[in-house]
Amino acid sequence: MAQLQDSQVSRSQKGLEVENEFATTELKRSEQRAQEAVERLQEASLLAERHESEALRLSGSVTQLTEDMNKVRGELSEREQQMLRIRRDSDTKAFQLSKMEKMLAETRGKLEKKAEAGAECKGRDNRDEMVQDLEERVRFTRRDRRNSLHRTQLLESQMKTVKGELVDTLDHLQELRNRLKRSQANAEQRKADMEKLQAGMR
C-alpha cells in the first residue's frame, strides 16, 4: 500500500516537474516575444521620429522655395512690364524718326530747288541751319532708339535667365513636395505600426 502511494507521489512529482518545465519554457518564450516586441517598438519609434524630422525639414525647404519662386515671379513680372514700356517708347521713337526723316528729305528737296532757282545767300544760311537742326535731331533719335533696342535685348536676355531659374525652381519644388509626401506617408505608416505593436503588448 505504501509502495503504491510512493509510486503515485512520484508520478505526481514528475507531472509537476513537466508542467513547471513547460510553464518555464512558455514564460521564457513570452519574455522573448515581449522583448522582441519592445525592440520593434523602439525601432519603429526611432524611424517615426526620423521621418517626422525629415518631413519638418522638407516642409521648411518647400516653404523657402515657394517664397523664392514668388520673388522670382515678381521680378519677372516687373521686367516684363519694363520691357513693354521700353518697346512702346522705341515704337514711338521709330515713328518720330520716320516723320523727321521725311521732313528732312522734304526740306532738303525744297532747298535744292531754291538753290537752283538762285535764292539769296542769307535765306540759304537760315535754311541750312534748319537742315542741320533736323539732322541733329534725327541723329539723336536714332541713337536713342538704338539704346532702347539694346536695353530691350538686355532685358529679354535677363528674362530668359530668370525664366530658366523659375523652371529649375519649380522642378526642385515638385521634387521636394514628392519627397515630403513620401516622408509623411512613411511617418504615418510607422505610427500605425507602433500603435499595432503597443496594442499587441497590452
Image (cartoon, helix red, strand yellow):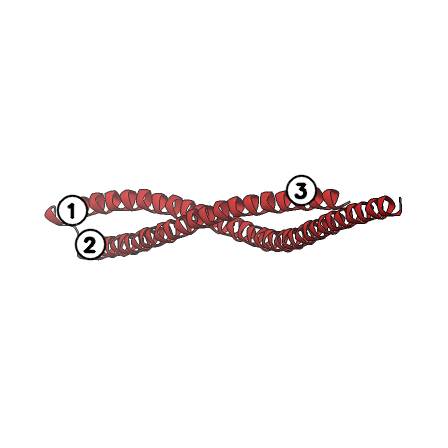
- Residue drawn at (77%, 48%) of the image: 14
- Residue drawn at (81%, 49%) of the image: 10
In screen coordinates, is 65 left or right of 52? left
Q: CA distance from mark 1 to mark 2?
A: 8 Å
**Mark 1 neighbour density, 10 Å: few (under 14) some (14–19) many (20 or more):** some
Residue contact at pointers 2 and 3, CB within 8 angstroms: no
As rendered, which of 68 and 92 lies closer to the eye? Answer: 68
Residue 34 drawn at (x, y percent): 71, 51
The amino acid marked with disc number 3 is Ala
Of mark 1 and mark 2, the one earlier in the sequence is: 1
Which element type, helix, strand or loop, lies under badge 3? helix
Residue 120 drawn at (x, y percent): 17, 53
For disc 1, the marked residue is 114
Of mark 3 and mark 1, the one earlier in the sequence is: 1
Of mark 2 and mark 3, the one earlier in the sequence is: 2
Which numbered circle lies on residue 124?
2
Classify residue 181 by image quadrant. Answer: top right
